[in-house]
Image (cartoon, coloured by chain):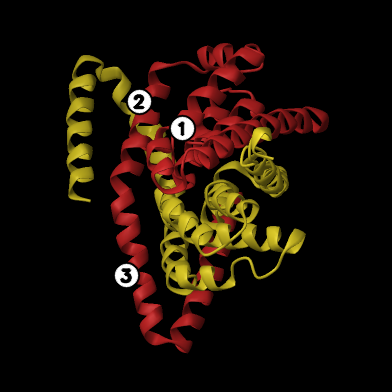
Chain colours: A red, B yellow
Amino acid sequence: MNNLIFAVLVNGIVIIGWLYLLSKDKDKGIKAVKIGLQTIFSMLPMILIIISALGVISSFITPDQISKTLGSQAGLKGFLFISVVSSFMQIPGIIAFPIAATLRESGAAIATVAVFACASTMSSVITFPIEIKYLGKKLPIIRICLTYIICIIVGLLIGFIFKLFS
Amino acid sequence: MKKSYLYLLIFFSLLSVLFYFFPDKFMPSLKTSLDSFLQFLLIFPAIILLMGIFTVIITPEMVTKNFGKETGVYGYFKALALGSLMSTGPFYLSFPMAKNLLDKGAKVSDVMIFVSAWNGVGIIAEIVELHFMGFPFMFIRLFLTASLILLSGPLAEFFYNLTNRPPLSDI
């Protein structure tokens, strides 16, 4: 129910913003819709694959198994494992958060969910070859190391804060 | 784009083979997937329009023009905001953009913050996060991530310059 109210609110605000843009500059308003639709249709297959994969995986793995490997029972091991694996991946934020939500609902620890959300969107070792083509070797190495440290700190702090208030 | 639809087709064919062997898993899988897809559909209009609006309004030229005018802490915050707003583009586009900014004389710290903000705290991703994860999680993660990104800028510049110094024998 909360989600529904949020969705109506966000859609409403964005549509009002778009109408304002349309009234100011008709061409830009129409171009915005075209670009938005193009982007979403190019992302749609990936979104559908991830969502169906999540459904299938969660029907084969029980929440109990997840909480044993990635939940608070697993302790730091599950946390570090997810932090390393997700640093290698590059998942767009739009797709990373539905995965994070599924992880949380299936019993993963909140710190692990947070480190997944951070590392899978930010650090991306897998795009390193593209990155060094543009920025040289030094800056990407510094960036990926610092980002990994950021993700670990954010994950641990979120785990701590949620424990404090629960 | 057509290629990714081909992957989708291949993926669904593999799934049908899987469900042929495990027919009892089909309904629970479908239910979970449909649930998350519906969650997505609820905010689809906002995502589509925002992607378009930001791509039209926040152009690379505008970012380059506004980048690095201010120095110090204010400049860091500006780099963070610009990165977050530019984030409608795919991740790998942030690298040529960063190179362009560096070539134009932007500071390493600002560019580092810009790239991290593009990926870590993009405006549309934050809306999706709020929708899927709820306000407490989104707010705390955004606050922590943004603060650490701001700190990492000057740190990155420090490390970058550390190794740029000429060796002692040259002095």
Q: Quadrant of residue A26?
A: bottom left
Dot 2 alpha-carbon crowd within 10 angstroms: few under 14, some 14 to 19, many 20 or more: many
Which mark is first along the chain, 3 or 2? Answer: 3
Q: Is residue A52 left or right of residue B143?
A: left
Q: Is residue A1 visible?
A: no
Indicate the chain on which mark 2 is placed.
A
Q: Image height check: is B24 above or below B155?
A: above
Callouts 2 and 3 in the same chain:
yes
Q: Residue at x 32, y 20 (%)?
A: B25
Q: Residue at x 63, y 56 (%)?
A: B110
Q: Looking at the rendered structure, which numbered label has been put on residue A125?
A: 1
Nearest to the eye among marks 1 and 2: give it: 1
Nearest to the eye among marks 2 and 3: give it: 3
Residue at image mark 2? A56
Q: Quadrant of residue A10?
A: bottom right
Which mark is first along the chain, 2 or 1? Answer: 2
Dot 1 alpha-carbon crowd within 10 angstroms: few under 14, some 14 to 19, many 20 or more: many
Q: CA distance from mark 3 to mark 1?
A: 32 Å
Q: Looking at the rendered structure, which numbered label has been put on residue A34?
A: 3
Q: CA distance from mark 2 to mark 3?
A: 33 Å
Tag 2: amino acid: Val
Q: Image height check: is A28 above or below A39?
A: below
